[in-house]
Amino acid sequence: MKCQECEELLHAYLDGELDAAQRAAVDQHLKGCDDCRQSLEHVHMLQRALQMPELRYTASDTLRQRIKTQLRKADARERRPAFPRLGMAAAAAMVAVALAWNFMPHGPGAPAAADDDAMVDSAVDQQQDAVKIGHLTDYASTSPSVLQRWFGGKLAYTPPVPDLKAQGYVLLGARLDKVGGLPAAALVYQRGSEMVTVFVCRAQHGDKALDTDSDDGYQVAYWTKGSLSFWVVSKLDLAQVKQIGSALQAS
Amino acid sequence: MGTPGKLGRFEETVLPHLDAAYSLARWLTRDTHDAEDVVQEAVLRAFRFYDTFQGGEARHWFLKIVRNTFYSWYDKNRRHAQTETLGDEAMDVPGNELPPDEVLIKEHGAKLVRAAVETLPLEFREVLLLREFEGCSYKEIADIVEVPIGTVMSRLSRARQQLKNRLSGEAAGVNT
């Protein structure tokens, strides 16, 4: 082993990140090389310096208290009814849906399906929250097959991960999210500064043709096909969002 | 939607790592108040996305959120915040074999080392912190920082090289 090679492996050697063979090779080289032994000692010195207790930071009690209070509030917020942002008319519609739901046969614990408007609203809400807190993807990958594998077992169904390269959109990754309280896959695409998020969730009703809606500056194209419902959410103009929707439907 | 017991489970699995989270945020922001803001926001984010946490290393999952929260904060505040020493090539000469000066480090102690770490470029600083203070493996660092392991190795080696040079008597420039 040459010194340069040893130097490249030195940090991984120190950090216990080499396999047995590499480790033995470095050991061998160090035995016969003063320079490399000295480099190693220098890094050791650094590590000792970084162990000084004065360099440890711990969270203050004030911060701990503040966080506990904030968490309790956040928890209470999450437990409140899901659609406080809707107006009275929509709220009345929700009540009607809820009433109708009560007379429909469904299994115990089945999540309540909201109507189309509320689902669109919820998809946009989720997207806005994700943007606001800067957490667009749980898993970043540009490969549909890798993402599909990542979803494996995380949801009760395997969402399709379509490729939108032909439309000029690059996959950024995916996250697990919710639409109207139902577990959903969110696929995130980008073209330049434009983002497109596709939510996929288990269908709560039969097939529905593509429809569009807008909410809070977002355009949404949505449809249900087979056992899955889709929402394409973006700030692009409606025609473009609709076009992506059609392309996805066809794929 | 909040599920019963979510808060309790969150407090049990994630909150024990609050010190690690604060330490990372403190080293990245270099300021107590900013670090507290970042940590608070990161905790709320983590709580919100706790449903998507698949089990496994809560600490590593949480530190990744802290780091992402820091970068959102940093992008928003960068104009008023850190002036980064990017591309600090002078500090990065691999041939410079000056040893870290142990006498100097002993005399000026933590203050000197802290300043040396805090002035490392962010991309080097974060891998160094995760390795030296949080004891993360290269694989964990690669996942948290979202770069290949090879990049973690090269950044870590450059971080240490720069740190060493900063702590060598000549470069430290301490007024004694």
Image (cartoon, coloured by chain):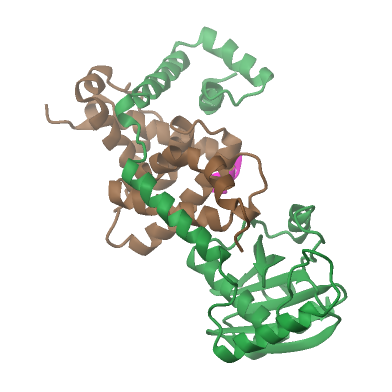
Q: Magenta stretch: residue A8 in it?
A: no
Q: Quadrant of residue A18?
A: top right
Q: Quadrant of residue A163?
A: bottom right
Residue furthest top as drawn: A31
- Toward the viewer: A247 or A115? A115
**If the image is split into quadrants, where does the C terminus of chain A sit?**
bottom right
Q: Is residue A248 visible?
A: yes
Residue B34 % position (x, y): 32, 52
Residue A238 % position (x, y): 63, 89
- Does residue B136 sit above or below A221 in this rendering? above
- Does residue B165 sit above or below A206 in this rendering? above
Image label count: 0
Residue A27 % position (x, y): 58, 12
Q: Is residue A29 left or right of residue A208?
A: left
Tell me the residue at 71%/80% (across/down).
A98
Q: Magenta stretch: residue B146 in it?
A: yes
Tell me the residue at 41%/51% (across/down).
A67
Q: Is residue A247 visible?
A: no
Tell me the residue at 12%/30% (across/down).
B175
**If the image is split into quadrants, where does the N terminus of chain A sit?**
top right
Residue B62 % position (x, y): 53, 46
Chain A colour in the picture = green
- Does residue A85 sit above or below B167 in this rendering? below
Chain B colour in the picture = brown
- Toward the viewer: B163 or A81? A81
Tell me the residue at 54%/78% (across/down).
A84
- Toward the viewer: A47 or A94? A94
- Does residue A68 sit above or below A220 in this rendering? above
The segment highlighted magenta reads B143-149
